[in-house]
Image (cartoon, rainbow, N blue to C red):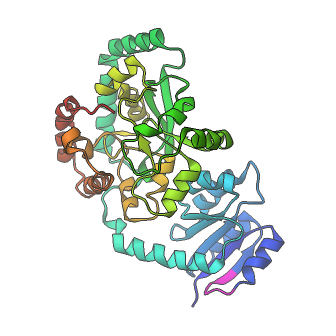
């Protein structure tokens, strides 16, 4: 029997367009979310769900989350969304891919076969850590560690806050969206180490790229692109790229799509001290206390960087807890032995496959010596 594609759409034109295409799917149409959920729980057939979120406006993400949470767990779940909503929809836990309305249904069929083969190949069910389900001993240790550290280091927190306020205007804490355990998105805290107008200085910094893999543009060309794409600059703690360049580089499968700056002039004097001593990371103790991170795990990634890892063998690294420190942070540190992006990703995979209390303690013990061998980045 063919795999069934359950199409959920209230758009008759789009539905007719999809159903009329030649495909190896058997396509069944449901016009409401509730009737679709009812269907999935009353059939034992192999299912793929394709949900048309284009007809929704502000409620699109809410319906996507509601639908996924109530589907059978064995169902591949795809979304049709407007371009402006695609990245956000992709990071809803359980969404396997996002498409535009002009997608060919047979491409979704081929995508489904590929995902099935990869899940079987990785055999993720053998892993001891269930995404988002941190073992009790690890959670207890995280709470004890973070709460004790916050109390003991409170005088340090006060000194850092005072120094940041004295040097530059703006918020003391910096929060950015990060992807952690099981692709869950959360606010990742740091002490602010850059000037508040850091994003406006981007056009003059391209010549300082440490990665060297992004094609350099002239300042005039970059200013023009920046003016046209102000809302599309993807800016992380240490890297920045226009979304147009990111998508181009991603399509061409380049190894790295970001640029990173040595002696970054966007960093304040206090911020440089904080980074070189890793004191800017201290607010992440609150992330740990809230259960969004663990003391040891894989570093949570910016949204656009994490999106690069959702469709290949590296996606397994998101099964591990998001960590304050981790295996690659204590491995081959220093300018002479810097790790390549692939080496870091492989160490993330190694951590999830060798996860244990003993290994966590070993990483914690190696973290302080690793911090002494800091890099000026």
Residue lying at the far right in this picture: please name it: 12
Residue at x-position 54% and y-position 64%: 96
Residue 100 in the image: x percent, y percent? Answer: 68, 65
Residue at position x 43%, y 10% from top? 162
Seen in the picture, residue 268 relative to 12 is either above or below; the reply is above
Q: Which residues are magenta?
A: 22-27
Residue 114 in view in this figure: yes
- Residue visible at 57% across and 79% down? 109
x and y, in percent, of residue 35 in the image: 73, 69
Q: Quadrant of the C terminus?
A: top left
Q: Position of residue 99 (x, y in %)?
A: 63, 65
Relative to residue 372, is residue 165 depicted above or below?
Answer: above
User: Within the magenta stretch, is there residue 25?
Assistant: yes
Which residue is nearer to you in this view: 218 or 233? 218
Quarter of the image containing the N terminus?
A: bottom right
> Can residue 266 be found in the magenta stretch?
no
331 or 149: nearer the eye? 331
Count of numbered circles in the view = 0
Horizontal side of 291 relative to 332 (left or right) equals right
Along the line of sight, which residue is nearer the eye, 361 or 346? Answer: 346
Q: Is residue 278 visible?
A: no
Q: Main secondary structure of the magenta part?
A: loop
Of residue 80 and residue 220, the one placed in the foreground of this image is: 220
Relative vertical location of residue 66 with respect to residue 266 in this rendering, above or below: below
Q: Residue at x 35, y 51 (%)?
A: 320
Indicate the quadrant where residue 131 lies.
Answer: bottom left
Q: Estimate the x, y position of residue 188 in percent, counting from the top left.
A: 46, 35
Q: Residue furthest bottom?
A: 1
């Amino acid at each position: 029997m063919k795999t069934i594609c359950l199409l959920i759409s209230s758009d008759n034109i789009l539905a007719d367009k999809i159903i009329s295409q030649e495909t190896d799917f058997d396509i069944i149409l449901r016009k409401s979310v509730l009737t679709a959920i009812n269907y999935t729980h009353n059939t034992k057939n192999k299912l793929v769900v394709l949900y048309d979120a284009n007809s929704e406006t502000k409620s699109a993400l809410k319906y996507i989350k509601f639908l996924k949470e109530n589907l059978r767990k064995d169902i591949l779940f795809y979304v049709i969304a407007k371009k402006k909503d695609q990245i956000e929809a992709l990071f809803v836990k359980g969404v396997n891919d996002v498409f535009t309305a002009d997608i060919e249904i047979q491409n979704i069929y081929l995508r489904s076969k590929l995902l099935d083969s990869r899940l079987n190949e990785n055999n993720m069910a053998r892993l001891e850590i269930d995404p988002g389900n941190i073992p009790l001993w690890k959670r207890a240790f995280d709470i004890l560690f973070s709460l004790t550290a916050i109390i003991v280091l409170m005088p340090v927190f006060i000194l850092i806050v005072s120094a940041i306020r004295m040097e530059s205007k703006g918020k003391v804490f910096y929060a950015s969206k990060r992807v952690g355990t099981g692709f869950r998105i959360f606010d990742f805290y740091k002490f602010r180490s850059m000037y508040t107008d850091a994003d406006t200085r981007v056009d003059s910094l391209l010549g300082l790229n440490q990665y060297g893999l992004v094609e350099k543009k002239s300042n005039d060309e970059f200013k023009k692109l920046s003016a046209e794409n102000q809302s599309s600059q993807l800016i992380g703690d240490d890297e920045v790229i226009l979304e147009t360049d990111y998508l181009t580089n991603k399509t061409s499968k380049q190894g790295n799509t970001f640029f990173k700056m040595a002696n970054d002039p966007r960093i304040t004097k206090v911020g440089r001290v904080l980074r070189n001593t890793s004191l800017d990371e201290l607010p992440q103790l609150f992330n740990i206390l809230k259960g969004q991170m663990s003391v040891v795990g894989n570093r949570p990634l910016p949204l656009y960087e994490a999106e690069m890892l959702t469709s290949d063998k590296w996606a397994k690294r998101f099964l591990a807890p998001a960590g304050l420190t981790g295996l690659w942070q204590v491995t081959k540190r220093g300018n002479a032995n810097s790790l390549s992006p692939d080496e870091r990703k492989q160490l993330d995979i190694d951590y999830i496959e060798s996860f244990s209390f003993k290994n966590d303690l070993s990483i914690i013990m190696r973290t302080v010596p690793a911090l002494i061998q800091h890099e000026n980045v």
